[in-house]
Image (cartoon, helix red, strand yellow):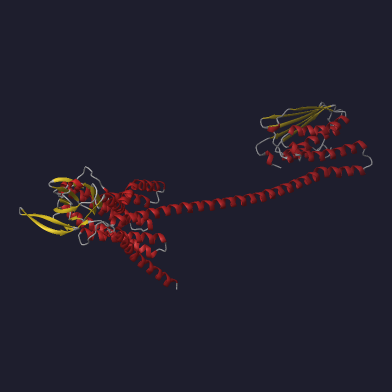
Amino acid sequence: MHSGKALTNAVFRFVLVLVLPAIMLLIMVKGLEVTNHINLPVVDVATQVIQQDGKHTYSEVSLPHNYTLGSGFSYGQFSLVLPKAGGDTTAILLPPFRDTLVMRTGGELIWQTAPVAYSREHMMPRFRYQPVYHELPNRLFNGENLSVSIDIGSSGGLRLPQIYVGTPEEVKPVYHRQYWSQIGVHKVMLWLTPVITLFYLMLWWFRRQNSEYLYFALGTVCWAMTNMTFTISNLPISQHIYWMLSVSFQPLLTLFMVLFLHRWYGIQARKLEYGFWCVSLLLVVASFVLYEWDPQYIWWRFNESFLRGFVALSAVYIGYILLWQACLRHSLSALILAISGLVGVYAGVLDSLDGMQLLDMYFPLSIHANLLIFLTLCGLLMYRYVSALNKSEELQKTLEDKVVEAVKRFEQEQSIAHESEKQRALLTERQNLLSDMHDGLGSQLVELITLLRVKSVGREDLQLKAQQCLNDLRLILDTRNPLFETQFTVLLGQWRSRIDPVMEASEIRLVWDVDIPDEEVQLSAQQKLDLLRVLQEVMTNIIKHAKGVTRVILCCRLDQGSLNIQIDDDGNTVEKYDAVDHGYGLASIRSRVERLDGQFNFKCGKMGASTIIVIPLRQGTEDRT
């Protein structure tokens, strides 16, 4: 079912592409057929003067009249009678024709479209297929008529059109209508050619991967050169150079159109493209060389056979691509391009038949068909470019939406991860706090309870132990206080404010010598707690075991990246001791210092004791627990 529908669609497209261009061309012909749109008095009879063997032969002919000498150049003489219009001036109108014309009366030149040459090499370029308007003063007329002789020269077969007469008010509107229908629009298009070319060259420059823009720009230039015939004015170049330039660009035009269609439809045919390149360049070079060698005969035959034959075969290949792509692809752009392209192919065939005088037309069709093709291509290229921009903007917007969505998802995940990390940190902190209370405060409370059960223990010992429990609890809380995270000296001062009453109760004076920058001491909460517990244990040992102590000096300094703490007392500790038996707690102090990767040294004698603690402050110390 699906394949049958696709086949029906392809057949419909095939018929549409073949038939619709013919209908469009027929409408174009009817619209451009000038004789059906002119309602003026007309001169449609003339007398042709034929010179042969020195004799003049006169033949009455109907206008329009075709004449050729068959030698690549035609020259003709005619005589006719123009009727006089009312008023002071008689206006004459010649429908679009392609030859040079000189009008005389009584041997006196009264008007010419361009100087008539009597050989091909002396002909000058002129406007072709352009209507001609001229005003003759009525004083030239002999009564109601004016007898004139007309000389016409043509590079091929010549044609004398009908001549319409009337007042300027009657003839001018007809002339302007014909001018804009035949030449005016085409001139405007040629004026726009540089703009179109530069625009698509810029598109190609910014989008190098789209080489179809480049080939379209080059094809536009070649199209303008090949259509010089219809728009060129009197330039200081010969007819031969003019013809050679306009004709030699035709192979390049077909070449760039083939390359454009290959890039447009994504056709991979490199070998065929190389063949088109070689043949096109060879024909262009051969055209220039043959023109220099024999412009009268060989170059003309070469142009009529090889060059036009290559252009015709290229047109067939272009038509095949357009027709095949229109049937193969289900896109409106392929269908539109195929229809406009086949309009050009049909128009080229009709113009060729007209050039061989097999048809009788006053106007070329290729000029309008080519204009339709290039306007269609401009529209399709612009549509493709705008569609690409819109698609790019849509993709960019989609990408932005996805980025915003990804950022929101990331922020949500980060928020969840941050909350989870916060919960883990809180849990870890709780575990550390419980561990500290269990290891420190818990063990001291157990010891205090044990002492309470011993009746021989004095009240002062119980009070000291209770004070130690309270100080340890305060140490735990102080080290978790955010206010002391970056102020180690303040934390030490807080600890001093709690140890001072105990020292004073023991009649011991504490000498405080602390001089360290807070920003250099980066310790974690657990490390600060361990360090303060070490200091507190040292003070407790001094109070409990040092005899006759009256002064304790605490000195704290930074030295080469290490925190040096030295505690000296003047007590008498001469007896031998053991860390466990005598209760000095030296093992606990050493264990805490080692956990801080530090060093511990204790010396004692009759003149006092000295405790030295060295804690390294390496980078990353704050991350250790």
Between 496 and 509, the one lying in front of the other is: 496
Q: Position of residue 258 (x, y in %)?
A: 32, 56
Residue at coordinates 26% horizontally, 47% vertically from top-left?
232
What is the number of callouts on the image? 0
Q: Point out the image quarter for the N terminus.
A: bottom left
Between 361 and 281, the one lying in front of the other is: 361
From the viewer's perspective, tell me whether residue 332 is left or right of residue 145. right
Residue at coordinates 42% horizontally, 54% vertically from top-left?
383
Q: Position of residue 560 (x, y in %)?
A: 66, 30
Between 426 and 209, the one lying in front of the other is: 209
Q: Is residue 512 above or below residue 251?
A: above
Q: Is residue 207 visible?
A: yes
From the viewer's perspective, tell me whether residue 221 is left or right of residue 585. left
Q: Is residue 207 above or below residue 485?
A: below
Residue at coordinates 68% horizontally, 38% vertically from top-left?
621
Between 484 and 595, the one lying in front of the other is: 484
Residue at coordinates 85% horizontally, 40% vertically from top-left?
469
